[in-house]
Amino acid sequence: MRVIWFDVVESTQDYIKSHIQELDDNTIVIANAQTKGRGRYGHVWYSKDNGLYFSILKKRLDISVLSLLVGASVFESIKNIYDIAPIIKWPNDIYVMLEKPKKVAGILVEKIKYDTIIGIGLNLNQEDFPADIEATSLKMFTNKHIDKNIFLIRFLDNFKRDLEYYKLHGFEAFRKIINDNLLYKNKKVTANAGKIEGILKEVDENGNIIIESNNNLLRLNAGEIELLREYNMW
Ligand code: BTN
């Protein structure tokens, strides 16, 4: 395993993308800060100092539920290291519950031909966020400062074990972790920019989210879920 650690880079994800030919399987690229950190659906990933931003290159790995598996691994790492109960927002965002749920980790899995780049952004030790960013850090939530190296080693260890477990036993145990800690379970949600409305049920055996809508069970394999806010006039 090779580790490339930048002080600042545009995006660890894009670094791997543009050097993919010369990088080996399991290369990890880390940055203390990113100037063009990005998330799913073209979102910007706030990447100032004190967070942990890294990408892992996996060559010729073909697991359809990989992004959920990574989410479950990040979830378990946070849970065990901080001794807290985080929540998973399908497919793989990790939240903690304050007056409302706030995001502490995001995952971006991208496939380039046969290779996969797994990008993970963790709000580890930030002391504050700009007002327009609805996030918190694990330090702000728990008051514990965890060294980046320590988190990384624990996570890589968990993830390796989880991949081995998955290869032997499949997705079921991870599905259970996700469903037992699922944000908005049995709540009214919208998906895909309001095109779908219904009750969020659970994640199925293929990693899809099941939404009950007008007595039908819809299964989505991608998308963004939001809590439906119903404004009652009376
Ligand atoms: C999301 O929540 O939408 C996913 C966020 C992924 C952010 C990480 S930080 C390391 C890697 N480099 C990037 O530019 N993005 C990912």
Image (cartoon, grey):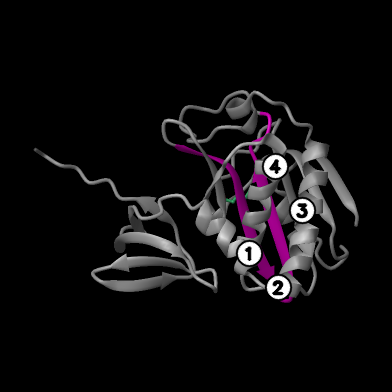
- The amino acid at mark 3 is Asn
Spot occupied by residue 46 in the image (x, y as percentages of width and height): 59, 38
Whether 106 is among the magenta residues is: yes
For mark 3, what is the residue?
Answer: 158
For mark 1, what is the residue?
Answer: 173
**Quadrant for the C terminus in the image:** top left
Q: Do labels 3 and 1 touch, CB within 8 Å?
A: no
Query: 195 and 212: which one is in front?
Result: 212
Residue at disc 3, secondary structure: helix
Point out the tag, 3 or 4, that comes first from the N-terminus.
4
- The amino acid at mark 1 is Ala
Q: Is residue 224 above or below residue 103?
A: below
Q: In the displayed image of the protein, which residue is found farthest to the left?
A: 234
For mark 4, what is the residue?
Answer: 80
Point out the tag, 3 or 2, that comes first from the N-terminus.
3
Q: Nearer the viewer, mark 3 or mark 1?
A: 1
Q: Do labels 3 and 4 touch, CB within 8 Å?
A: yes
- Asked if residue 215 lies left or right of residue 138, the reply is left
